[in-house]
Image: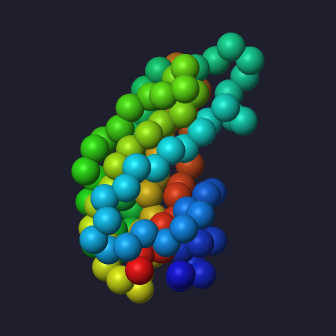
Amino acid sequence: MSSSTIAKADFIAERPKHQDSVLPYVIDWSDWLDSGETLTDFEVETVELAGISLVDAGSLINGATAIKFVIGGGTSGETALLSIKGEVDANKVDYRTLAIEIK
């Protein structure tokens, strides 16, 4: 996994993703939300592609405190970096990044 890509990530996927697999990923925002807050909108973007594609742009889950999305593909030996934007309201927007090693 590229150390420069990992340095940019808030999260690192627990297991490497095989280049041919299509897998769901979940980012839980509850640690960053104040009591009673929920996400109202989100966006998943690829920053460093490493050959991956966004298969399903995702949905809000767990009472709108987490984002689930699905990615596929990838180039073996590279690391993908995704940026996930979570929005509570127009005044509270945050970004998290996820690094995924491709095998």
- Which colouring convention does the figure follow? rainbow
The quadrant holding residue 103 is bottom left
Q: Which residue is drawn at 54% across and 44% down?
A: 27
Q: Position of residue 89 (x, y in %)?
A: 52, 19
Residue at image point 68% right, 13% down = 36
Q: Nearer the viewer, residue 19 or 27?
A: 19
Q: How many labels does the image show?
A: 0
The residue located at (37%, 73%) in the rendering is 18
Residue sitting at x 72%, y 22%: 34
Where is residue 50 drawn, in percent x and y? 34, 74
How far from the left and from the top, in percent, is residue 5?
53, 74
Choose top left, top right, bottom left or bottom right for residue 78. Answer: bottom left
Q: x, y percentage for residue 98?
A: 52, 58
- Left or right side of 41 for 73: left
Residue 39 visible in the picture: no
* Residue at the limit of the structure toward the bottom, as seen here: 77
- Residue 60 seen in this snapshot: yes
Q: In this view, does 26 lie above or below 11?
A: above
